[in-house]
Amino acid sequence: MFSGEKPRARMDVLRLPVIGPMLRWRHARTTLQLLALGVAAVLVLHGLFGPDLAPTNLATVVTWVHYRGLLVVALLAAGNLFCTGCPFVLVRDVARRARAPRRLWPAWLRGKWVGIALFAGVLFAYELFDLWALPRATAWLVVGYFGAALAIDLAFKGATFCKHLCPIGQFSFAASTLSPLEVGIRDRDVCAACRTADCIAGRRAPVPAPAPVIVQRGCELGLFLPSKVGNLDCTFCLDCVQACPHDNVAITARVPGAELADDRWRSGIGRLAARPDMAALAVLFTFGALLNAFAMTGPAFEVQRVLAGALGAGREAPVLALLFVGFLVVAPLVLLGAAAAVSRGGSTYAAAPLARELLQYAPALVPLGVGIWLAHYGFHLLTGFVTIVPVTQSAVVDALGWAALGTPRWGWAGLQPGSVLPLQIGFVILGTAGALAVAHAIAERAAPAHARRAAAPWAVVLIVLGAAALWIFAQPMDMRGVEFPG
């Protein structure tokens, strides 16, 4: 199920009625981007000029309650929809009409390492500064995001910010491996006969010109469709759909998570087992999910109090930094290192360095990470989903001076936390089961004669992490930003 050549897909979203023509429409992405840009503008304005109380401000409520939950839901339902409608790219594209970038991103910075550091930095800043409670800081974070994307992509060609730097993008790339859809090709023979590779090089104007004129760009992330595998690094921009002159691009159904066990060489990425940065992203994605959820519980506050006493620290930063190092560095090294040492005995690569074993099994963490993020963000979304109504009503009052949408109904929130817990348990169990399936599939490829023995230590680690997640979600959780006045 997880290995071998993929059969030709039976379903292509681009061939479906209504939704297919919508996605194939040349301006579909621009329309989504304009809508997202409008929402971002409203959030920034209300964050900067609206009330300081987080539960009454659109910047904090929409960003930290609604957006994060809907992001994970969208990734699991369809694919990388945030990147499809990314407003940062729209602003960048407009700016590039006035100033085209000329430089390439330095070779020594390529990969995910900078993006991983920024991802971890955002998690740290979120906890240290209590961003969920600061509308103005949240608004400036959004503005800073636009500025960073603009500065990087006006200096460097392609989708440099998306591929190498964007923390949201790295999160989305990891989670999209569990999406049921992927961009691929319909007929491999058509690609074999193609001589222009427009899907990656871009489509040129049909009329002769002194210099080539690209009328439709190809994939800015360097994913050549005939050798593309899965959703990693794919932003679902659908530029390849517009660029292909043979109408040979499809959005096909696939087995969620299958690409995590696929060790084929893939365009733009290479082989997963040869990419330490991809393994590090999987580790941060999963252990970061545990840490982010744990930080909302009473035991986390107690751990920080004990650490502060032991260190004699009067500030939160060093204590939080120690907690992050423990969760994101020490725990993964101990647990995954031990699993790699045991599983290597039954692997084809028994004589290879220990890191080789860790790299090839690290992707199995991702389904568990998705389950934990979904349980965490789903908690905020479901317990605070209806908050968008009174906050929007209040924002209209702030903007117009009168209740055009009615008097804010501050009592509206969402489900009670206790009613969400069964769903959280289900998400974590499903994520753990998916991770176990991927680990076993990797073991069948790497150690076919001893697959069960090779997969066993990874199964133990995954079950331990899943149990830890269940314990975390059983603790009373901080509602963070949805406590309403009155």
Image (tube, rainbow, N blue to C red):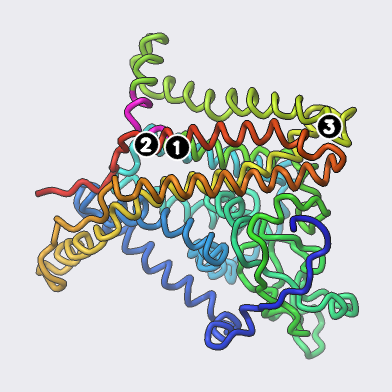
Question: Which mark, residue 346?
Answer: 3
Question: Which mark, residue 54?
Answer: none
Mark 1 — residue? 470
Kindly identify the residue that appears in the image at 28 percent across and 54 percent down.
384
Q: Quadrant of the N terminus?
A: bottom right
Say whether residue 262 is left or right of residue 420: right
Q: Which amino acid, mark 1?
A: Leu
Residue 294 at least partly seen: yes
* Cβ atoms at labels 3 and 1 below 8 Å apart: no
Q: Quadrant of residue 447?
A: top right
Q: Compared to 139, does 360 lie above or below?
A: above
Q: Name the secondary structure under disc 1.
A: helix
* Mark count: 3
Queried whether the magenta region covers residue 181, the answer comes back as no
Question: Which mark, residue 474?
Answer: 2
Q: Which contiguous range is marked in magenta?
A: 294-301
